Amino acid sequence: MIMFKEEYQFWIYASFFIAIVGFSLLFNGIILKFSKTLGIRDQKGTTIRWSSVSKPALGGIGFYIVFLISIACYGILFEADGIFKAPSALALIGASSLAFLMGLADDAYNTRPLLKFLVQVACGVIMISAGVYVKTFPYEWMNYAVTIFWVIGIMNSINMLDNMDGITSITSSCILVAILIYMYMMGLSTEFEYITMLGVLAGLVGFLFYNWHPSKMFMGDTGSQFLGLFLAAVSIKFLWNSKGMEGTIVQSRQIVMVILCFLVPIVDTTVVSINRLRRKQSPFVGGKDHTTHNLSYLGLTDTQVGFIFLGLAALCTFLTAIIIRFLEDWTHLHTLVFTGFAILVLGIFFYITYLNKDKIRKS
């Protein structure tokens, strides 16, 4: 493997990041200019969006392309054979590709929910077969079950969160930043996942230019399915199974880091699912009752809602970085404080939905 001095590595990665942002801006601009109906979902179908205007849902194609470019760049900067000798790298490529194809098919044909569910299970099985699974619990069957649940849950959660301009893009970006910080602090910046995460992050930044309110395009299921799998996979390896700076593993600390890092999609999915079940509705049918929508019902603009979620996601990233860097001696008090913060955020959004219950029924 080719090794770079730290200062050279910084400039190489910075140049790579800027180049991918530029490519993402250019690619999305070109595809937006030439798209007419490709990727535009039927508004009379099952998909319910906050925006009443049909727009191309092609952003996910750009994510997958920069993912492939990142893989190629890793092969140039480091040993290409390293990809094919690492089961975890092959599993990430295979599962991400499967998720991308599933999302692409769903955008084109509105596939059956059962087929999507089976593909999500298959993605989890691929990761497990490569040894990339949650290793927090004492029994292997529990670890396998949690891994499958996590992969399915995050893929659906990211998909559900993609309900208003810019929300999923900024949330996913903050999650990637948190994991990149962990990898950098642990000296893992030459790992295969590091450069692919950097590439996908740059792709999200370029896409956000077109996805921020008022958006010109959506990421579609192509993007949300790919992102959901990608985020679930890297979080298993670098959050669920993370070690502290001192090299020890503390299970409660691992779980707290996962919850904090993914707090925004976890809260949105939890609030929406519980409220829909209380109304005897399916959690998997679209609606205008998400946490983002409830902030709008309070009188906030889409841009203001975007900044609120940006602030919350950035705060969660900051708290995760604090845990990684400074809280080496983890105690029950730390678990209590950070869990309390997560419960507080969940409670606030539940209260907001209670205030808007009449508006939700009319939506």
Image: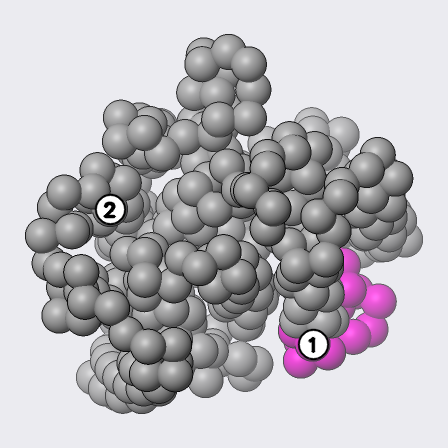
- What residue do we see at 76% from left, 43% from top? 329
Q: Are marks 2 and 1 in contact (CB under 8 Å)?
A: no
Q: Is residue 361 above or below residue 18?
A: above
Identify the disc placed on residue 89: 2
Q: Is residue 143 above or below residue 303?
A: above
Q: Is residue 287 above or below residue 5?
A: above
Query: Which amino acid does the dot numbered 1 rest on?
Result: Phe
202 in the magenta segment: no
Q: How many marks?
A: 2
Q: Earlier in the sequence, mark 2 or mark 1?
A: 2
- Magenta region: 292-307
Q: Position of residue 197 (x, y in %)?
A: 38, 62
302 in the magenta segment: yes
Q: Quadrant of the C terminus?
A: bottom right
Disc 1 residue crowd, few under 14, some 14–19, many 20+, Cα 10 Å: some
| Disc 1: which residue | 307
